[in-house]
Each structure stands twice: as C-alpha cells, then as structure tokens.
Image (tube, rainbow, N blue to C red):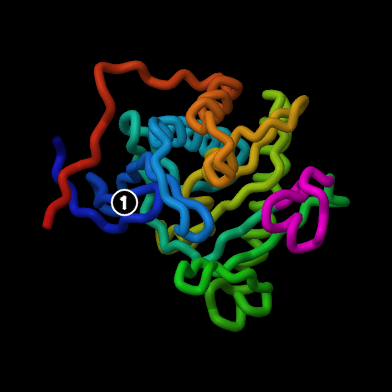
Amino acid sequence: MSRRRRIYEGKAKTLFEGPEPGTIVQYFKDDATAFNNQKKGTITGKGVINNRISEFLMTKLGEIGVPTHFIRRLNMREQLIRQVEIIPLEVVVRNVAAGSFAKRFGLEEGTQLPRSIMEFFYKNDTLGDPMVTEEHITAFGWASPQDLDDIVALTLRINDFLFGLFLGCGIKLIDFKIEFGRLYEDDMVRIVLADEISPDSCRLWDLRTNEKLDKDRFRRDLGKVEEAYQEVARRLGILIDQGPGDVRGPTTLQ
C-alpha cells in the first residue's frame, strides 16, 4: 500500500499529498454525516460510487468549458486533483423547495420555485455554516467582487447543464451544493470548481415518482441508501469497477 502525507481529513473525503507539485490525491470514504455532523453512519460503497459520479460530472462540465480541479481518476476510491485555495463558501442552488429551504419559507416540499435561487453559506462547522450575503463575503474578504462574479456565472452554467443532464436520465435536480477554489497557475489566478458533485451534495428525485435518490435517504432513515446511489450511477451510464477487492486508504506518514 502507498504511503502518503495526509493533508486534510473531512467528513466524506481525505486529502493526501499528490505525486507531483501542485497535485493532491482525493480519497472518497464511506462515512456519512448529516445535520452538521450530529448524525453519523456508513453507506457501504458510497466512496466508490461518488468517485465515479463526480469524475463523470466534472469531466462533462470541463468539456463545456467549466474549469475544475479534477485531473483524472486513479482507482476505485481516489482521484488526482489540482491543489487550489478553497474559498470558504458553500454555494447552493435551489430549483425546487426541499429540506431546510422549504421549512424556512413554509413551502410544501416539492414546490417548483419561480426561478432558480442561489444562496451562500460560510464554511464553518463550529458556527453551523451560517447563510451569508454578498455583502458579508466581500466585507470579510472571503472573495472579491470579481471572484463573486465568476462564481455566480459558473454556478448558473453548472445548474443549467446538470439540470438538463439529469433530466435526460429521468432524474429531477432539486438542489445542490458546490465549492470553488483559486487555482494559481502560470502567474494567473483562476476560479475553478472544486470538491465533488455526487448524491452526497445534490438532491435528486425520480422524475416520475419523486422517489429520493440521494443522501436524504440517510438523513431521514428511509432505507435503501446504497441502492439509491447505485441507481443514480446506473442512469448516468457509469459502470462501477468490478475488481477483486476494494481500495483502502494510503498509509499516512507521520
């Protein structure tokens, strides 16, 4: 097994030093959390499926000109990504009222919104990831006005593309969360899509039945969580690797 220096361990992924300067190895775990880490569990095989789904979606977005941190998938659970400076914001796009948004505005879950709504949340687990405005973002220096313009423009393109892609698979994209980072390259700084896009970070409902095909099945104890993730991968036409065994995380260098 390879030995690498661990850079960061989050709720669903671990980051290791990459094989080349400016690269990172992103390892997808089966760990699952909800409600700001108050609920914890394991979704067997989630890391393998999310690795493939995120690879597929990042690649497709790259093909339409959306810059991302993704380089290539390495194995069942790992992908090579560019090292970026993560902007401490979660960008959420809502197409249909669901979850906390529906409760916040007293809407019935499943209500079609008059237009897509974009929200920003400050990435801080201790504070519970509070919702913030563009004024907060620029005042506290988390992103410049130009950064924000780029983030908004990219997010709108991502929503348009993903909504149509999932619709073609019989899936309704209810909402999703994405993150961005600054890529320092050739004396230039670019805003790029980072983190992942998967059923962990999207609400995905069956177009006909409204059956949930995402992490809400874990959040709400609906059961068949693994099957829901596998169904999303199946509809996207992704064949999960069949091998002699799973891939364990690298040994961490002390």
Q: Position of residue 124 (x, y in %)?
A: 48, 69
Q: Is 48 above or below relative to 135? A: above
User: Is 109 colored magenta in this rendering?
Assistant: yes
Q: Position of residue 107 (x, y in %)?
A: 82, 54
The quarter holding residue 81 reads: top left
Whether residue 190 is visible: no
The magenta-colored residue range is 94-111
Q: Which residue is drawn at 54% across and 33% down?
A: 223
Quarter in which the C terminus is drawn: bottom left
Q: Position of residue 40 (x, y in %)?
A: 42, 50
Q: Residue at x 37, y 33 (%)?
A: 73
Mark 1, other Cα within 10 Å: few <14 / some 14–19 / many ≥20:
many
Q: Nearer the viewer, residue 58 or 210?
A: 210
Q: Nearer the viewer, residue 86 or 218?
A: 218
41 vs 158, left or right, is left
Quarter in which the N terminus is drawn: top left
Q: Which of 197 and 103 is in front in this view?
A: 103
Q: Nearer the viewer, residue 84 or 196?
A: 196
The quarter holding residue 130 reads: bottom right
Q: Residue at x 41, y 58 (%)?
A: 84
Query: Label 1 belongs to which residue?
Result: 15
Q: Where is residue 179 in the image (x, y as percent from the top left)?
A: 53, 56
Element under disc 1: strand
191 vs 49, left or right, is right
Q: Residue furthest bottom?
A: 139
User: Is 130 colored magenta in this rendering?
Assistant: no
